[in-house]
Amino acid sequence: MKPKNQLIICMGSSCYSRGNRVNLELIKAWLSERNIEAEVEFKGQLCSNLCNKGPVIIINEHVYQDVQPANVINILKTALTGSRVNKTIHG
Ligand code: FES
């Protein structure tokens, strides 16, 4: 079955060094803790041409800019609310 959600993290050098290096690990851990990896297609992509607004993450075609490690989990929770994934999220 195709994952219901798509999560893309910009792995270009600017975003990577400005926060997505840490965000990548936080997102992987968050998906794993909730055992919802199969529900979310998670992949990286090269520069998204928004370097001055990075770190960039794209969830279900919505672009999130200036995503810092301190707020990446809140963004995931908010972005995935209302989806099937949400039923497995606690807190
Ligand atoms: S490196 Fe992420 S937008 Fe350019």
Image (spheres, rainbow, N blue to C red):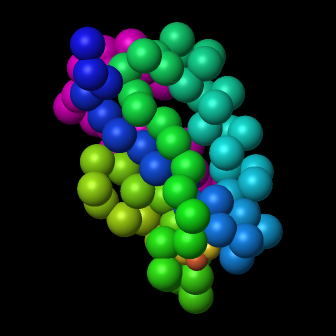
Note whether 41 is above or below 59 in the view shown: above
Q: Position of residue 16 (x, y in %)?
A: 72, 64
Q: Residue at x 65, y 68 (%)?
A: 12
Q: Is residue 29 left or right of residue 60?
A: right
- Position of residue 40 in the picture relative to residue 20 (left or right): left
Q: Residue at x 34, y 45 (%)?
A: 79
Position of residue 70 measured from the top left corner of the image (x, y, whole percent): 67, 55
Say whether residue 89 is visible: yes
Quadrant housing residue 29:
top right
Q: Quadrant of the N terminus?
A: top left
Q: Identify the magenta region.
A: 67-91
Indicate yes or no whether the magenta region holds residue 69. Answer: yes
Query: Farthest residue in the bottom direction?
Result: 52
Q: Is residue 84 left or right of residue 6?
A: left
Picture layout, residue 76 above or below residue 19 = above
Q: Quadrant of residue 4?
A: top left
Place of residue 38 in the rendered image (x, y in percent of width and height, measured from the top left): 42, 16
Asked whether residue 22 is drawn in magenta, I would say: no
Q: Which residue is found at the position 78% from the left and 68% from the top?
A: 17
As rendered, which of 21 and 47 lies closer to the eye?
Answer: 47
Question: x and y percent of residue 8 in the render?
Answer: 46, 50
> How many discs mark residues in the rendered view?
0
**Vertical arrangement, residue 31 with respect to residue 7, above or below:** above
Query: Regarding ligand 1, which quadrant of the image does it lie in?
Result: bottom right
Q: Residue furthest front?
A: 46
Closer to the camera in the image, 26 or 1: 1
Q: Is residue 90 visible?
A: no
Q: Is residue 33 left or right of residue 80?
A: right
